[in-house]
Amino acid sequence: MSEQKKTRTTVDIYGTQYSIVGSESTSFIRLVSSIVDDKMREISDKNPTLDSSKLAVLTAVNVVHDYLKIKDELEALQEKIKTEKG
């Protein structure tokens, strides 16, 4: 079995540097990190008294919520395509 090459990328999320290791491209890791940073800043602007750990949890909850909504929409579209073909 071949192993995928791992890439180490340093990113800045909400003022803290993180070293992320993954099989995705550096540009993809930077994109994901940028989205997380943007979401944390958006939530922080609306809730300036949150400490960083609560901010991180709230950000994770928001991102997973968005993911699940999009996943449901995708599944509904896939089902619609199936029934239209059928």
Image (cartoon, rainbow, N blue to C red):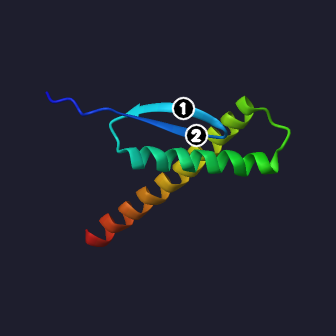
At a point 69% along the width and 39% down the height, the residue shown is 58
For marks 1 and 2, the one nearer the N-term is 2
Residue 8 picture location, percent across and down:
39, 33
| Local crowd size for mark 1, using a 10 Å CA cut-off: few (<14), some (14–19), many (≥20) | few
Q: Which residue is labeled 1 in the image?
A: 18
Q: Is residue 60 above or below residue 2?
A: below
The image quadrant of residue 2 is top left
Horizontally, residue 49 falls left or right of residue 70, namely right
Tell me the amino acid under the disc marked 1.
Answer: Tyr
Q: Which residue is labeled 2 in the image?
A: 12
At a point 68% along the width and 45% down the height, the residue shown is 40
User: Separation of disc 1 and disc 2 at Cα?
Assistant: 6 Å
The image quadrant of residue 81 is bottom left
Residue 35 picture location, percent across and down:
56, 50
Closer-to-camera residue (10/31): 10
Horizontally, residue 78 falls left or right of residue 41, namely left
Residue 83 picture location, percent across and down:
32, 67
The number of discs equals 2
At a point 82% along the width and 45% down the height, the residue shown is 47
- Would you say the residues marked 1 and 2 are in contact, meaning their CB atoms lie under 8 Å apart? yes
Residue 6 picture location, percent across and down:
31, 32
At a point 37% along the width and 61% down the height, the residue shown is 79
| Local crowd size for mark 2, using a 10 Å CA cut-off: few (<14), some (14–19), many (≥20) | some
Tell me the amino acid under the disc marked 2.
Answer: Asp
Quadrant containing the C terminus in the rendered view: bottom left
Horizontally, residue 74 falls left or right of residue 36, namely left
Closer-to-camera residue (64/36): 36
Closer-to-camera residue (47/14): 14
Q: Secondary structure at mark 2?
A: strand
